[in-house]
Amino acid sequence: MPEQPPIRWNRSVLIPAAVLLPLLICAMLSLWRHSLTTATDVLLLVAVVVAASATGDRAIGIVAALSSAAGFDFFLTEPQFRFEITDADDIEATVLLLVIGTLVTEVALWGHRQQARASRRAGYLDGVLGTAELVLGPHDSVEQLAAGVAAQIRDVLGVSRCRFVRGSGYDRRMALLDHDGVVTRNGRRLDVERDGLPTDEETALLLRRADEFVGCFVLTSAADIARPTLEQRRVAVLLADQVATLLDRQSG
């Protein structure tokens, strides 16, 4: 499930700040325009762009880069207080400021995505290990354990509902989530990451014991389109397998 950085909650404040702060800094630097070098001005503005990019919001980073370039042009180049540059070095510095600002923003976004992906994987692993501990430990019934696993599967896949049905009597018209994470309907593979799980019917995640179906988790995504990745679908299969393991132990 895609995660948005918490900082996005304050975009209405941060975007205006990304516009005004570089301009304010450029106005202040203009007071010492003859004692500071162009390189110093650019480095200070790059630091502002880096801070904006650290929010993980592309718009905030790019706005800060554009505002920095505009402020540099208006306050710190000749002719001053005009959006016009006559010196080749100043043109080069402005272009570099825009390029560096954009690159820093993209690198920061990549880092945020990697961190979010690692966090999700750690959460998936904790869920699988926690379920395995429940299977091995004491519990009142298979249904009670399956209800907890169903809630985990619902959260991992981002579906509206997930319920456990014991036995082999599932509706053959349902789409099937196979053990390799592939979703098929009537023998045809579905592109879940593009089109999402079916919303016009439910999807079954079957539990197998040897060659026998012993139950299934029924997934409902009618309220909102769920587009779980292959990794998420495989995690759901691992979670479901814990219940299949328990059913196998009980019948053994």
Image (spheres, rainbow, N blue to C red):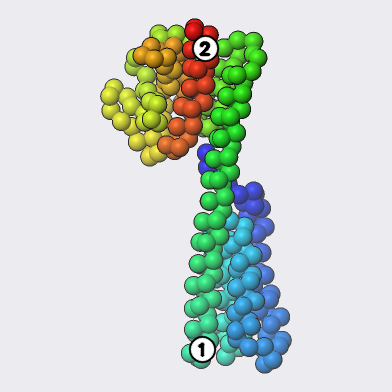
Q: Residue at x 37, y 23 (%)?
A: 176
Q: Nearer the viewer, mark 1 or mark 2?
A: 2
Q: Is 46 placed left or right of 164 in the picture?
A: right
Q: Amino acid at mark 2?
A: Arg
Element class at badge 2: helix
Give coordinates of residue 3: x percent, y percent.
56, 44
Q: Is 115 placed left or right of 244 in the picture?
A: right
Which disc is residue 200 wearing?
none
Q: Residue at x 56, y 35 (%)?
A: 125
According to the picture, the residue beneath numbered tag 2 turns out to be: 249
Q: Residues within 10 Å of mark 1 (few under 14, many from 20)?
A: few
Q: Is 14 placed left or right of 149 in the picture?
A: right
**Relative to 6, residue 196 above or below:** above
Which disc is residue 89 wearing?
1
Can residue 84 be seen in this snapshot?
no
> Furthest residue to the front?
252
Q: Residue at x 38, y 30 (%)?
A: 180
Element class at badge 1: helix
Can residue 205 be seen in this snapshot?
yes
**Relative to 184, residue 55 above or below:** below
**Front residue of 227 and 119:** 119
Give coordinates of residue 110: x percent, y percent.
51, 56
Q: Residue at x 45, y 32 (%)?
A: 234
Q: Is 231 placed left or right of 128 in the picture?
A: left
Q: Amino acid at mark 1?
A: Asp
> Furthest residue to the left?
187
Give coordinates of residue 159: x percent, y percent.
50, 29
- Going from N to C along the chain, the mark reached first, 1 or 2, is 1
